[in-house]
């Protein structure tokens, strides 16, 4: 084999060509998987969508009466996931700033290991902890204040979900801050900025895309989490009017009732409709989060 032919087949140009096309194939496969999931959910949910119509947006979920209003589950999901993000984001980003800018090197690795260990804990373990520890603690704390409160509800689900989201927010945000060049920090110090001002105005601003990725990842887990939330929210078919009310989230109703719905095609289709709406909400929240991140970057002159 001549050298020129060898270079064409195995040289840097050939490797670059293969690399580009392998990555293209991987991207197409990932896109096809997502499209396949959407198509499957649409096909399975179609009977309920066309039979129930706007009734799917109703407030009553009663399969025995043929009523499949899923808005109660949408409301529960928004309450629990939204409150979890409100609780987890400030604490997670603050922890990431501490690890990146203030934490001594001898403590940084052990703390990162703790965060990674938290991410590896199964959801069911968090659920058992919430059931046996968090719910009784909330009941003992707030029952004298709000009256008849069992400890189950939006607040319990949001707290346990926030704990589960922390490792993702902390790890990804910390990695983004570590990638900020030290030259930017040194330039900030040279201009007389304090460590806190540098962390807030330089490091956080520069690491904003990475922090946005952390928010997106945690948002996906917040909306899609099932077992831990299922065990502590009370699973009441009522609209939550506050953080102390019980709720039923979309993932939980699918887990709890799919086995009963296998013999009833319309019932099963309604649960697939819940899953389809859950997917659409996830996409909508992801797009909204990206828009907010892009707006923040423009405000800081980063894009």
Image (spheres, grey):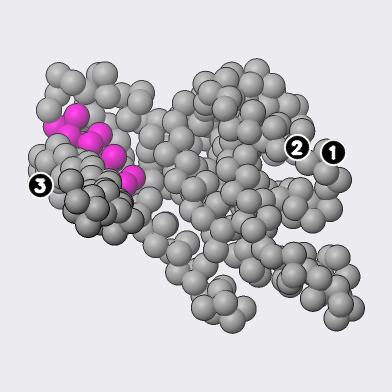
Q: Is residue 70 or residue 179 the one in the foreground?
A: 179
Residue at mark 1 to residue at mark 2: CA–CA distance: 7 Å
Residue under the point 30% across and 53% down: 11
Q: What is the secondary structure assignment of the residue under circle 2?
A: helix
> Of callouts 2 and 3, which one flags the residue occurring earlier in the amino acid sequence?
3
The percent coordinates of residue 197 (x first, y second) are 82, 70
Residue under the point 33% across and 45% down: 278
The residue that disc 1 covers is 106
Picture layout, residue 79 above or below residue 128: below
Residue under the point 10% across and 47% down: 50
Q: Are marks 1 and 3 in contact (CB under 8 Å)?
A: no
The number of discs equals 3
> Of callouts 1 and 3, which one flags the residue occurring earlier in the amino acid sequence?
3
Most common SS among magenta residues: helix
Q: Which residues are magenta?
A: 266-280
Q: Residues within 10 Å of mark 2 (few under 14, many from 20)?
A: few
Q: Are marks 1 and 2 in contact (CB under 8 Å)?
A: yes
The residue that disc 3 covers is 50
- Compared across the picture, whether 150 is left or right of 291 comes to right
The residue that disc 2 covers is 109
Picture layout, residue 291 above or below residue 241: below
């Amino acid at each position: 084999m001549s050298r020129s032919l060898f270079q064409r087949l195995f040289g840097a140009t050939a490797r670059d060509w293969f690399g580009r096309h392998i990555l293209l194939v991987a991207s197409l496969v990932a896109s096809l998987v997502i499209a396949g999931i959407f198509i499957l959910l649409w096909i399975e949910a179609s009977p309920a969508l066309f039979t129930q119509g706007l009734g799917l947006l109703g407030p009553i979920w009663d399969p025995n009466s043929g009523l499949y209003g899923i808005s109660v589950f949408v409301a529960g999901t928004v309450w629990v996931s939204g409150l979890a993000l409100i609780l987890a984001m400030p604490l997670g980003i603050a922890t990431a700033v501490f690890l990146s800018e203030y934490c001594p090197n001898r403590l940084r690795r052990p703390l990162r290991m703790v965060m990674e260990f938290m991410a590896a804990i199964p959801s069911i373990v968090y659920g058992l902890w919430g059931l046996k520890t968090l719910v009784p603690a909330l009941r003992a704390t707030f029952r004298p204040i709000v009256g008849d409160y069992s400890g189950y509800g939006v607040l319990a689900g949001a707290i346990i979900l926030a704990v589960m989201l922390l490792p993702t927010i902390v790890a990804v945000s910390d990695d983004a801050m570590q990638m900020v060049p030290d030259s930017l920090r040194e330039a900030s110090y040279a201009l007389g900025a304090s460590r806190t001002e540098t962390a807030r105005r330089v490091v956080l601003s520069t690491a904003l895309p990475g922090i946005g990725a952390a928010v997106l990842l945690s948002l996906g887990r917040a909306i899609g989490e099932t077992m831990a939330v299922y065990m502590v929210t009370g699973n009441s078919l009522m609209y939550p009017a506050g953080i102390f009310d019980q709720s039923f989230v979309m993932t939980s109703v699918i887990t709890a009732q799919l086995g009963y719905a296998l013999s009833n095609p319309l019932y099963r289709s309604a649960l697939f409709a819940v899953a389809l709406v859950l997917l659409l909400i996830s996409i909508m929240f992801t797009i909204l989060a990206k828009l907010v991140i892009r707006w923040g970057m423009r405000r800081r002159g980063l894009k």
